[in-house]
Amino acid sequence: MERISNLAEGWGVHPVNFDRKWMDLSKLPLDLSVIDKLLREMPASNVFVRVTSADPANSNIKRLTLAEVPDLVTKLESGAGNIHLQAIQLDEHLPVYRQFKQAFIDKVSNSVPVFNPELLRHSSVGLFVSTPGATAPFHADPEHNFLLQVIGEKVMHSFPPMDFETFPSEARELLASDKLSMLKTYVPEFEERAIELDLQPGDLIYHPPMSPHWVRTGSKGFSLSYTISLVTPDVEQTLLLHKLNRKLRKVGLTPSQEGLHPVLDKLKIDIASTGKKLKHLFVS
């Protein structure tokens, strides 16, 4: 994939490298002790600690609770272990994150004509911290994602979102239905299809929905990145399509691949959307 720097051009289909002046990251918290305290006050369901291997194909990661890592700051600063930590929904806990998120959404709205913030289904601020050399294995996310690098460095290997060899239909259905984001399809030969996105402090990238990727932290020190995740109507529709396809597959049918028959895809989305509304009506 070629590199592009225009968000409107890449929206939904291609990663985008930003000019560092696009958004001021200086107001985001950087102090590890402050962040560590916040994470320990958050619900355990919003904090994920993983011990990974250096192999992007190895999805058999060890999962820990934050309570099992009482010396997180020491491990990060010393480089001990191979820890990759993710926290989500930070904006529900500190005003600084809520304010930053709103300013960021306003910026996106001014940059992408097709993006309507009034139609947002969900938005969230998250973070990643990782020890030197830690690897986030091959996986995919359904949202529009922005990665904001504030401390350390990392490299993301990003693959085209509509490549059904790297990210097969069955795996898309599992992501939509069961939130299984780890992929077991990676082989080194796929790297010729990837774009490498280098992230230094102050760098921003946009990453489109359903685009497989893996990430490695640099060897010189720990990494701290923030994320902004946006769930738009197009994301919701894609997930509805894959959820319905998953149900069809469970009863022995073979659903058509997304994008091959757009009219049929639209019909499926309409059916799934109607079913969701009826379910909500009767549950309420």
Image: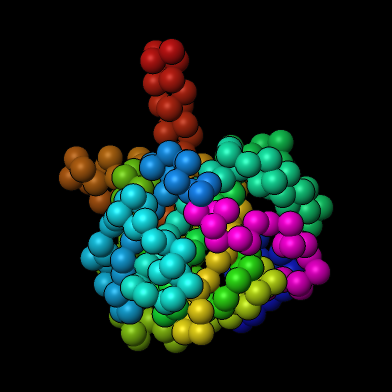
What residue is at 18 percent from the left and 45 percent from the top?
252
Residue 195 in sight = no
Q: Residue furthest left?
A: 252
> Is the N terminus in the top left, top right, bottom left or bottom right quadrant?
bottom right
What residue is at 57 percent from the left and 53 percent from the top?
34
Q: Position of residue 89 (x, y in %)?
A: 53, 44
Q: Nearer the viewer, residue 78 or 272?
A: 78
Q: Is residue 31 magenta?
A: yes
State how the image is colored. rainbow
What residue is at 21 percent from the left and 43 percent from the top?
250
Range shown magenta: 17-36
Q: Position of residue 114 (x, y in %)?
A: 72, 50
Q: Position of residue 37 (x, y in %)?
A: 51, 49
Q: Is residue 30 magenta?
A: yes
> Is the C terminus in the top left, top right, bottom left or bottom right quadrant?
top left
Q: Position of residue 187 (x, y in %)?
A: 30, 80
Reply above or below: 243 against 161.
above
Q: Nearer the viewer, residue 231 or 93?
A: 93
Number of numbered discs on residues = 0
Q: Nearer the viewer, residue 134 or 236?
A: 134
Residue 131 in sight = yes
What residue is at 60 percent from the left and 71 percent from the top?
151
Q: Is 249 left or right of 118, judged from the image as shown?
A: left
Q: Quadrant of residue 191?
A: bottom left
Reply above or below: 149 against 33.
below
